[in-house]
Amino acid sequence: KDVARGLAVRHDHGSQYMSDTFQTEMCFLGIQSSPAFVRAPEGNGCAERFIRTLKENLLWIRTFATVEELRLALLAFRHIYNTTWLIQRLNYQTPAQVRQHQLSAVAIAA
């Protein structure tokens, strides 16, 4: 229990996210629910765009014989995405570069 304490999941008000099952599981894991504002679809636009990117660059072009093969492919995709993809909304930096900059700023402030 509480394996993800301090983590918040931003989501829309879709039935799957607002369901008792989903909310109970998040609570069990220690994840805070953070519903987006009503009529503000841009709140989860980044997540939806990432899922589209994942589908277009991995899930729709490969098939997987086992769940383990899929798991390993997802881990590889995560590494490649975080270390090589230049993201416009991140001023054409990789996610890893932005994360490192944010961590450095926190360390300096502490």
Image: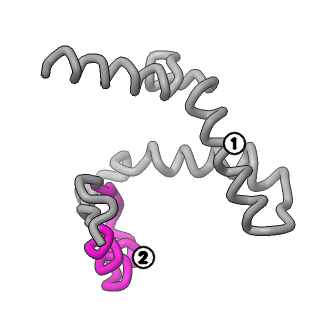
Q: How far across and down, in percent of the image, does residue 101 sit?
A: 36, 18
Give, as a three-letter code, the residue at label 2.
Gln
Q: Is residue 26 magenta?
A: yes
Q: Which residues are magenta?
A: 8-29
Q: Quadrant of the N terminus?
A: bottom left
**In front of the other: label 2 or label 1?**
1
- The colouring scheme, among rainbow, by chain, secondary structure or one colour, is one colour
Helix, strand or loop status at disc 2: helix
* Identity of the residue drawn at 85% across and 60% down: 63
Distance in Å between CA atoms under marks 2 and 1: 28 Å
Whether residue 42 is situated above or below residue 35 in the rendered picture: above
* Identity of the residue drawn at 46% across and 20% down: 97
Residue indicated by mark 1: 76
Give, as a three-letter code, the residue at label 1.
Ala
Which of the 4 quarters of the picture holds residue 2?
A: bottom left
Overall secondary structure of the magenta stretch? Answer: helix
Q: How far across and down, in percent of the image, does residue 60 sit?
A: 79, 54
